[in-house]
Amino acid sequence: MVCRTLKQSRFRFKKAIKWGFRVSMVGPTLIDIREHIDGLGTKGGQYYVRCGRTGDRPVPAAGTRFPDRATARAAARATEQYRSALRRYDPQVPYYDLIVCEEPPMGSTKGHRHDSMTERDEYTLSEPVITKTPTPGHGDLVEFCHRVAGAVFETLSESGYDDIETAVMDAYFELAENVGGPDELCLCLLKSITAELHERLSPADQAEVLTDAAARLKPPTDETNPLDATLDTLEQRGVIESYTGSPDSVDLDTGAEAVVVQISGYALSAQNDRLPVLPVTLELCRHHTDHPPQSIQVTTGDGGWQLMFGLADTGDQNGIVSAPIDGEV
């Protein structure tokens, strides 16, 4: 019976993660609730949420301060809603007795005050604290990362890569419980997916997965040069801060064997002398489906990264999702 329950839970979570992490779980999604709590927070707030038994400050309210007691109560209710939704997919999520605490401003001699969340008649989980998606346009980086992750996961699901699916789900369980901010969560998730693809699939299979995943995303609507459009999108979504391109990057269809771009402020950090480039490659595939890059090489320099996209089909694919870092320019 336990095995069946866990299997059913994993199946439900698999369906949720498959559709870009935006599917409704119990009313709003986990992302919606995180963003709601983040919107309630303020710098320098005197109130915070913690467990009255253990003193722990649980995700997703951990590290967030609130301006007044009423707002902190709303955050506590949303935190319970979040953890209840997550518990449907991971029964091991711990229970907390949430209370609102006040910490006086620095230098004040006023003692700490605690307000226990005992007014259970104020809310029930059948009447969610938040019931709709946040205003469109909020959290561009989060939205972009989860669209990328959702498209890749859906491709893996339909391509029969069950072992990678399982690894991604396990990573998301752990990340959703332990990572604080939504931006950090989505970036860690992309890095985890990148690592699984790099370790478990050949470069040819990686390219096939990304080409398929790109086809699941909304196609571009303009005639802008594919590489420029890719980099513009990454800049607008907060994946990179700025970029410059080599002369050959003006047109990917000129027959050039390789193009070079310099990016700064890349949101994903290097791991084990490799740079996760999955979102870059996938976005480029979305804008240039007929001729995706065959390889990517990375060099450090000028406070950022230099990326060389190999366009010629030499039969030696490398660095499609995780590119090796060669050294300094």
Image (spheres, rainbow, N blue to C red):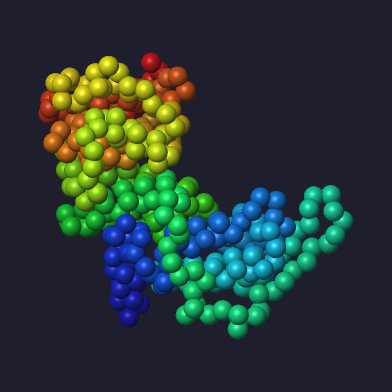
Residue at 60 percent across and 68 percent down: it is: 74
Q: Is residue 68 left or right of residue 276?
A: right
Residue at 16 percent across and 28 percent down: it is: 316
Instruction: For the N terminus, give its image quadrant.
Output: bottom left
Position of residue 118 relative to residue 11, above or below, is below
Residue lying farthest front? 222
Q: Quadrant of residue 11?
A: bottom left
Residue at 64 percent across and 69 percent down: it is: 73
Closest to the observer, 3 or 164: 164
x and y, in percent, of residue 268 in the image? 42, 38
x and y, in percent, of residue 95 in the image? 54, 72
Asked if residue 247 can be seen in this view, the reply is: yes
Q: Quadrant of residue 223?
A: top left
Residue at 21 percent across and 51 percent down: it is: 216
Position of residue 322 relative to residue 245, above or below, is below
Closest to the observer, 167 or 115: 115
Residue lying farthest right? 109
Q: Is residue 320 left or right of residue 50?
A: left
